[in-house]
Image: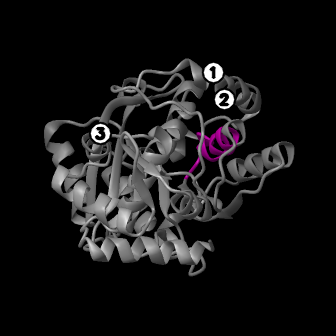
Amino acid sequence: MERIDAINVLNDVSGAVHLLEGPNRIREFLRQVLRFQPVPLHSIARSTSLTVPVASALRRELEKRKLVARKGGIVLTEYGNSLLASVGVTKTQIPRLQSGYPFPSWLNPVVEKLDTLLSSRPTPDFSLDQSHAETLTIAMRVAYLYEHDGMEGKELLFLGDDDLTSLATIIFAKEFGLQLGTVAVVDVDKRILAFIEESCNYLGCDIDTFSLDLREGIPADLANTFDVFVTDPPYTLDGLSLFTARGIEALKPGVGRQCFLSYGSKSPSDSVKVYSSIVSMGLAIQEVIPQFNRYVGAQMYAGVSNMIRCITSQDSVSAVPEDLSKLYTSSRNDPD
């Protein structure tokens, strides 16, 4: 099956069951079946955040189209396997991440490779609010991307990547035999981009790099291009809002595109502003994991930050702050 044909099928199924979450949730449903088949209906409903009646209606539609069958639970047919393969999703032996996201031992090989590769990464530029994440955190980020269908066959954009999560994504994909779409990095720090390019030569992979200050906008050839964006933005509200807005501009139109956003805890009043900014741009928050990210020697936020996972809605729209003169904490007299 060709990729475009598979996408059309997913769109057709979504329309047939009037699924507000869109075709990306259909793909997620099928992917969960592939990973854990045979899967009970209640289990697949829970893992895809669908009500049981909606999951049941979706199962019937998928059965009608010969994509799934029932054999002690829901299983994929040969046609269902073919559809997923055409969009980059294949069977792996990667276990499910446990509730609460403790670090799993099966990620150790990824950490070992990261420790070697990142030992010579550029030092943090504190004027840009850079602070290196620990390698355990970086490995967990990419495992979290995989767990929530943010990797296989997806067009991935990293907005600012001094943590080098893009390289960790490549290492993870190589370790577990995953197929990736385009991987791109936008960063204002040319040292980071040069290190990524040098590392790609070593790893034998391709990452598209773009030297860009996000205050200047997203180039036309990056707009409406990606399925997922990942960012660990500056520590100001304006920084979070700008990076999120540019990420939305870079995503393909439609419901269910993904955002993985790392940001520290704030006071209650400032937290309202942070989440109001995210929601005002039409992003639906799916999960917030406190202290998911840990940083090397960082004083900001006691060296930890939260993981915020969002998806686009029908109302998603970019909203760039009017005043970008104090984007980084170093430029503010009253840092957030």
Tag 2: Cα neighbours inside 10 Å, few (<14), some, or many (≥20)?
Answer: many
> What amino acid is found at the position of numbered circle 3 in the picture?
Ser
Q: Residue 107, position in %: x, y?
A: 59, 25
Residue drawn where x is 32% and y is 67% of the image: 61
Along the polypeptide, which appears first: circle 3 or circle 2?
3
* Extreme residue in the top direction: 105
What number is the disc on residue 43? Answer: 3
Q: Which residues are magenta?
A: 160-173
Q: Nearer the viewer, mark 1 or mark 3?
A: 3
Q: Is residue 63 visible?
A: yes
Q: Which secondary structure, mark 3?
A: helix
Q: Residue 323, position in %: x, y?
A: 33, 67
Q: Which residue is mark 2?
A: 110
Q: Mark 1 and mark 3: span between their CA atoms?
A: 28 Å
Q: Nearer the viewer, residue 115 or 3?
A: 3
Q: Nearer the viewer, residue 54 or 98?
A: 54
Q: Nearer the viewer, residue 206 or 267?
A: 206
Along the polypeptide, which appears first: circle 1 or circle 3?
3
What number is the disc on residue 108? Answer: 1
